[in-house]
Image (cartoon, coloured by chain):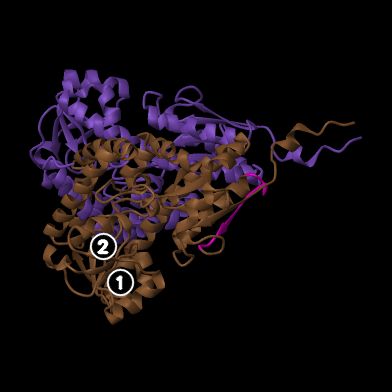
Chain colours: A brown, B purple
Amino acid sequence: TLAAPALAQSSPKINWRMTSSFPPSLDNLFGAAGDLATMVSEASEGNFVIQPFAPGEIVPALQAADAVSDGTVEAAHSVGYYYWGKDPAWALGSTVPFSLSARAQNAWLYHGGGNEMFNEFLDQYNIHAFPGGNTGVQMGGWYRKEIKSVEDLKGLKFRVGGFAGKVLEKLGVVPQQLAGGDVYPALEKGTIDAAEFVGPYDDQKLGLAQVAPYYYYPGWWEGGPAVHFMFNKEKFESLPPQYQSLLKTACQAVNGNMLHEYDWLNPPALKEVVAGGAKLMPFPEDVMQASFDAANEIYAELDETNPHWQKMWASIKSFRNDWYLYNQTAEYTYDTFMMIQQRAGKL
Amino acid sequence: TLAAPALAQSSPKINWRMTSSFPPSLDNLFGAAGDLATMVSEASEGNFVIQPFAPGEIVPALQAADAVSDGTVEAAHSVGYYYWGKDPAWALGSTVPFSLSARAQNAWLYHGGGNEMFNEFLDQYNIHAFPGGNTGVQMGGWYRKEIKSVEDLKGLKFRVGGFAGKVLEKLGVVPQQLAGGDVYPALEKGTIDAAEFVGPYDDQKLGLAQVAPYYYYPGWWEGGPAVHFMFNKEKFESLPPQYQSLLKTACQAVNGNMLHEYDWLNPPALKEVVAGGAKLMPFPEDVMQASFDAANEIYAELDETNPHWQKMWASIKSFRNDWYLYNQTAEYTYDTFMMIQQRAGKL
């Protein structure tokens, strides 16, 4: 008998399913799963196949991590903070209010031991995750009325995600849960007063300027939110080493690509939403400061009660302080100078 | 006779040499070639091997592109602007004074058609290149004396690279070429007045605070310089498709990684150089403005005479204007708020 050639075993056929938490209408976010699949398939000559699924095709958007955890699917593309209700430490892998900007979050995840800490935490869920994108700082959302001070937040029915909602509740906001498709009619009727979504490129598709024209920035609850590719840990570890390495490399390639694509798409989209009637405004300073203080109250409580949170947040905070000191020098002054030239019409 | 198994042909043994333009002492820049080699080797089960070489081992640092072009080596890790003397359009793949920041340069290269245009230009050199890192905005360098105004640039013997030197010459600077190891003694003796290098992490190793304590920012000649992996075009095209895809994916992974690593290393290094005696200062406004105007004079000339330059620069300029308008909203206000908290000791 002839022994099977050794090489025949080296590229085993593997078929995985990846459930995404992002609807296909968010084409950059949803498309990242397809980008990963293409990279992995091409480099393995079609032997390692990852098939992306939209929310609802296998499980709903917010059950992606559970589906990975219990092995319903091998993989998911999702965001840590969607699962803060299970444990707030989930959010630290992606972002929490007033945390790191996109570049800093990447620095912490890849070189500050951040992603290793996140994976230590995820061990209990049988999940191993790699960063899989970042949107950059998001916008603060669309408001029917102008927000002149922190007083105007009282009673504001605001469609806003989990952790940010918890912070804003302290300032009197009434957080609302609403599917994306219901946002426009709810704002039109006044059932809600405001809604936040992503950044100009994605926001533009909703046409909210017609019903809630005040478009605020920055989305301080998402200074640099990281998206993650999440893998069932046993399935990941059972991959042959060359596929593990390929998958990790491809995740890192996609991680950069999502931010680069948003950075290309958002600037022209911002001009278009303003041309379409959006009234672009910064949050008043007292809103920012009160939100920052409210967030810190929550963080102080979590530091006392949640060891995973405490360890990761201490690491982020230490770097956050160094990062925002460092950035006062070259990056900020360069950007400031270039913005002055932009305003002077010299670019 | 037994036909060779089909799979045996799918992972052919390939051995490539990659010459780097960066000395091993710049461990992040030089290390990127090794990172790429590891990713490619692991995912191909050791069949696709790329061996990195330091400058001088095969060819000197600034002959890396030539060595790729003529097939002396299959690959190089280098920077486009090193070759601006061949043609200024080389520099646009990496950066020119007052061009895009790191995020914007990546957006343009990957999604604005920038890297495609760069490769069209590189066709004449038989080179195909992928982005392979970014340092972020660099520092403005070390000066023996304070620079109080643009007048202080007259006669200044400044160790500064090619394109920036050309701009600074218009303001009276006398650009100097000096190997890295000669910088310290030259500043100590006063043979030169100033020297620029990279950012705090790399600069720190030179110990220049002892001999030229004024440490200026920003390095406006390198707002977001892209490094490139350059491949001999014929060699790249003769790779099997799965290796081409793997190489491209790995280049993109390394591209992000370099910036993330600098972003992790620079903030603490900045604190250390200041603790070590560096006097951290922003360039005076008139120096920035005069430099910007001088750069624009050169760009206007090139627009008239160099079609490759004109096409690429027009594309960059259009995005640069949109980018620095967009960034006045969420990114800048978020960073500004966080820096205010940092200064207030609240982070």
- Relative depth, front residue between B134 and A151: A151
Look at the image and give the residue range highlighted in magenta: A44-55
Image-quadrant location for residue B151: top left
- Relative depth, front residue between B17 and A227: A227
Instruction: Look at the image and say whether residue A337 sits in the magenta stretch.
Output: no
Question: According to the image, label 1 marks what residue?
Answer: A273
- Identity of the residue furthest to the left in this view: B148
Chain to which mark 1 belongs: A
- Identity of the residue furthest to the bottom in this view: A189
A45 horizontally vs A165: left or right: right
Image-quadrant location for residue B80: top left
Give percent across and percent down for residue B290.
Answer: 16, 48
Location of the N terminus of chain B by quadrant is: top right
Cα distance between the residues tagged 1 and 2: 14 Å
Mark 1 or 2, which is nearer the eye?
2
Instruction: Look at the image and say whether residue A48 sits in the magenta stretch.
Output: yes
Chain to which mark 2 belongs: A
B12 horizontally vs A75: left or right: right
Residue B15 shows in the view: yes
Which residue is at a point 36% across and 27% down the rendered structure image? B26
Instruction: Give the SS element for disc 2.
Output: loop
Decide: is B107 above or below A306: below
Query: Dot 1, how many residues are within 10 Å of its Cα: few (below 14), some (14-19), or many (20+)?
Result: many
Identify which amino acid the numbered label 1 is placed on: Val
Location of the C terminus of chain B by quadrant is: top left
Which residue is at a point 17% across and 66% down the rendered structure image? A153
Question: According to the image, label 2 marks what residue?
Answer: A140
